[in-house]
């Protein structure tokens, strides 16, 4: 394991999103706050999802996690597709990286961007409404695992795509629908039975549900089940990504 | 360095083949490049040069064969092979987010080198980039970006340096300073592999030259042997008066005929210059001046690859 190389690639990826922080951090924070203001204003007092929890407070963890995971996905996918299209991927392919080293660096940067955006949303949101923190470690575990899983999905999308619009399609037709239908804005218990069952098959639901448990100590599904789903997804995606990187899928021989 | 080290080639290719669909990009290519050589790899567009360089750099997977860099197999021992090799890509590519110094520091770290600033500063100075160290890559001219590419290839001090068309689109001053620097690296013991469209550059710089076409190795010889391949030269004859009548036996050998000058293609081994001159005199040509023009590398290249567009490409590029 070459830690210097891995840390350098991680550092380069973090520097990349830090240099364009208005686009990569500030813009998603503002978007999340707009959702919070609009949905909070319209639905506050009309919907009670968890007993004793206001709708706006219920909304915050969902919006926070949605922003975290969408940005983790955007970080790896945009970095890879940009460097593939511009040809600068050669600077990563020529050095003696192992597939696992590359994977760790890209995922690490995705997690850090996800957390940076998440902290930004949280710090601004708590000025608007008080949100309890039931278990900080659960919150962090789901934020990190969620970013990890979405960073890995972004890596797969970035390797597969050859054009920017393919990444946009991946995002619009897969990531956004699965996120919006994962209980960000509602409890899946309020859904008709068929939609309830379908929502339980959506892995993104477990990211949001487990994360929300960390705030309120209540969730639609047992938190250990959500944690288990996340750990399985993490392991499966790690194996897929490392093997794709090792084979050079659409990177070498392109 | 012991005897085995010296005998070990810098680059060794054995039965290298690569196919893309119906296109056989490389076909059973085998040769060695010795340590410390200045080696030229020539071929027309689409000959397989870039495929070969990509294979050296581990950027593609071979269908057959093996490649090693200083004894390290590019697939099985890829870490050591890549540490041994620096590649300057043909395309000008860059990461637009970073400054020149950041670009070199990151590239250095990718090879496991921390605190490499002394060497980075030396590279910046040698390549005339010191005053651009903190400039964003986007702000640099094309020539400057190419210098950064060279610095990136050298940042981990590789023993073998591959330059893929490094002077394409580069102005004369930069080209000369680049060659001064590369010559210095060669003198210091680096093995240099060069592909270029400018055949006079290969003729001037390279010790040995390989010519490939359609994925096959056509020739691999020292520059001198390649030039003296027995394929001939030209005989320039200047007459005192306009040359009107040329003996029939030489009509098919006329390379140029303008007024009182004629150039005939001759074969170094089978033609006698004295006999030709006697026959021309017998045809009433009053000879004033005679010169034998040796083949240039370009002549040899064109003859071997059948690529008559080379001269045109070169002159266009020089004007550009």
Image (cartoon, helix red, strand yellow):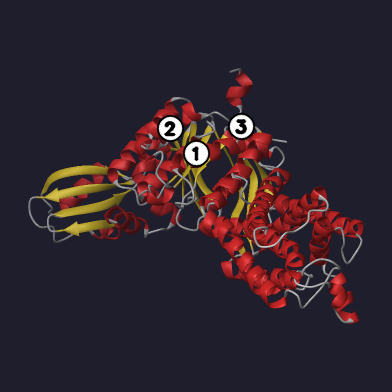
Task: Give the residue number, with chain letter if any, for mark 1.
Answer: B104
Q: Could you tell me residue A143's position as x and y percent?
A: 75, 54
Q: Residues within 10 Å of mark 3 (few under 14, many from 20)?
A: many
Tags 2 and 1 touching, CB below 8 Å: yes
User: In 3D space, how far apart are the residues under numbered discs 3 and 1 (Cα atoms)?
Assistant: 24 Å
Q: Which of these two is toward me, A2 or A49?
A: A49
Sooner in the amino-acid sequence: mark 2 or mark 1: 1
In the structure shown, which secondary structural element does the residue marked by tag 3 occupy?
Answer: loop
What residue do we see at 26% from left, 44% from top? Answer: B293
What number is the disc on residue A182? none
User: In 3D space, how far apart are the residues under numbered discs 3 and 2 (Cα atoms)?
Assistant: 24 Å
Task: Give the residue number, with chain letter if any, for mark 3.
Answer: B70
In the structure shown, which secondary structural element does the residue marked by tag 1 occupy?
Answer: helix
Q: Residues within 10 Å of mark 2 (few under 14, many from 20)?
A: many
In the depicted structure, whether residue A231 falls above or below residue B132: below
Q: Quadrant of the N terminus of chain B?
A: top right
Q: Could you tell me residue B176's position as x and y percent?
A: 31, 38
Tags 3 and 2 touching, CB below 8 Å: no
Q: Quadrant of residue B84?
A: top right
Q: Residue furthest top?
A: B2
In the depicted structure, whether residue B296 falls above or below residue B182: below
User: In 3D space, how far apart are the residues under numbered discs 2 and 1 (Cα atoms)?
Assistant: 10 Å
Residue A126 visible in this rendered orientation of the protein? yes
Q: Chain of mark 1?
A: B
Q: Chain of mark 2?
A: B
Task: Give the residue number, with chain letter if any, for mark 2.
Answer: B123
What residue do we see at 37% from left, 35% from top? Answer: B130
Q: Quadrant of residue B77?
A: top right
Q: Could you tell me residue B257's position as x and y percent?
A: 19, 58
In the structure shown, which secondary structural element does the residue marked by tag 2 occupy?
Answer: helix
**Quick check: A133 left or right of B38?**
right
């Amino acid at each position: 394991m070459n830690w210097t190389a891995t840390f350098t690639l991680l550092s380069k990826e973090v520097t990349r999103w830090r240099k364009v922080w208005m686009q990569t951090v500030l813009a998603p924070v503002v978007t999340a706050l707009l959702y919070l203001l609009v949905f909070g204003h319209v639905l506050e007092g009309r919907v009670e999802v968890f007993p004793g929890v206001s709708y706006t407070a219920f909304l915050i963890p969902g919006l926070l996690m949605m922003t975290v995971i969408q940005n983790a996905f955007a970080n790896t996918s945009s970095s890879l597709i940009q460097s593939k299209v511009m040809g600068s991927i050669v600077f990563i392919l020529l050095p003696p990286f192992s597939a696992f080293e590359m994977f760790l660096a890209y995922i690490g940067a995705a997690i850090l961007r996800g957390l940076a955006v998440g902290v930004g949303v949280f710090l601004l949101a708590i000025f608007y409404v008080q949100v309890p923190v039931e278990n900080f470690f659960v919150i962090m575990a789901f934020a990190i695992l969620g970013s990890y899983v979405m960073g890995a999905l972004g890596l797969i999308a970035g390797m597969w795509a050859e054009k920017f619009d393919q990444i946009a399609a991946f995002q619009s037709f897969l990531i956004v629908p699965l996120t919006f239908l994962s209980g960000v804005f509602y409890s899946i218990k309020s859904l008709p039975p068929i939609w309830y069952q379908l929502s339980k098959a959506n892995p993104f639901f477990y990211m949001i549900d487990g994360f929300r448990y960390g705030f309120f100590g209540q969730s639609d599904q047992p938190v250990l089940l959500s944690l288990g789903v996340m750990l399985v997804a993490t392991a499966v995606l790690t194996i897929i990504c490392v093997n794709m990187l090792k084979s050079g899928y659409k990177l070498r021989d392109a | 360095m012991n005897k085995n080290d010296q005998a070990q080639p810098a680059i060794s290719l054995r039965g290298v083949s690569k196919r893309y669909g119906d296109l056989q990009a490389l076909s059973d290519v085998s040769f060695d490049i010795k340590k410390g050589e200045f080696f030229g790899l020539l071929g027309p567009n689409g000959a397989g040069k870039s495929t070969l360089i990509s294979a050296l750099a581990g950027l593609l997977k071979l269908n057959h064969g093996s490649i090693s860099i200083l004894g390290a197999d590019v697939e099985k021992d890829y870490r050591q092979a890549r540490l041994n090799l620096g590649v300057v890509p043909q395309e000008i590519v860059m990461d637009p987010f970073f400054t020149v110094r950041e670009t070199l520091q990151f590239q250095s770290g990718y090879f496991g080198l921390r605190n490499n600033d002394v060497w980075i500063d030396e590279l910046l100075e040698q390549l005339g980039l010191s005053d651009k160290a903190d400039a964003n890559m986007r702000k640099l001219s094309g020539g400057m970006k190419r210098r950064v590419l060279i610095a990136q290839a050298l940042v981990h001090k590789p023993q073998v340096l591959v330059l893929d068309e490094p002077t394409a689109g580069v102005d004369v001053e930069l080209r000369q300073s680049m060659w001064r620097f590369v010559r210095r690296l060669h003198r210091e013991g680096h093995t240099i592999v060069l592909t270029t469209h400018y055949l006079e550059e290969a003729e001037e710089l390279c010790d040995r030259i390989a010519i490939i076409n359609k994925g096959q190795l056509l020739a691999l010889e020292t520059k001198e042997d390649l030039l003296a391949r027995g394929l001939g030269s030209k005989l320039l004859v200047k007459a005192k008066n306009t040359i009107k009548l040329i003996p029939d036996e030489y009509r098919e050998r006329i390379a140029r005929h303008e007024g009182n000058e004629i150039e005939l293609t001759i074969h170094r081994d089978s033609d006698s210059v004295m006999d030709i001159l006697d026959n021309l005199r017998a045809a009433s040509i009053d000879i004033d001046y005679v010169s034998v023009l040796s083949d240039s590398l370009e002549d040899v290249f064109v003859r071997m690859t059948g690529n008559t567009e080379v001269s045109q490409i070169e002159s266009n590029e020089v004007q550009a």
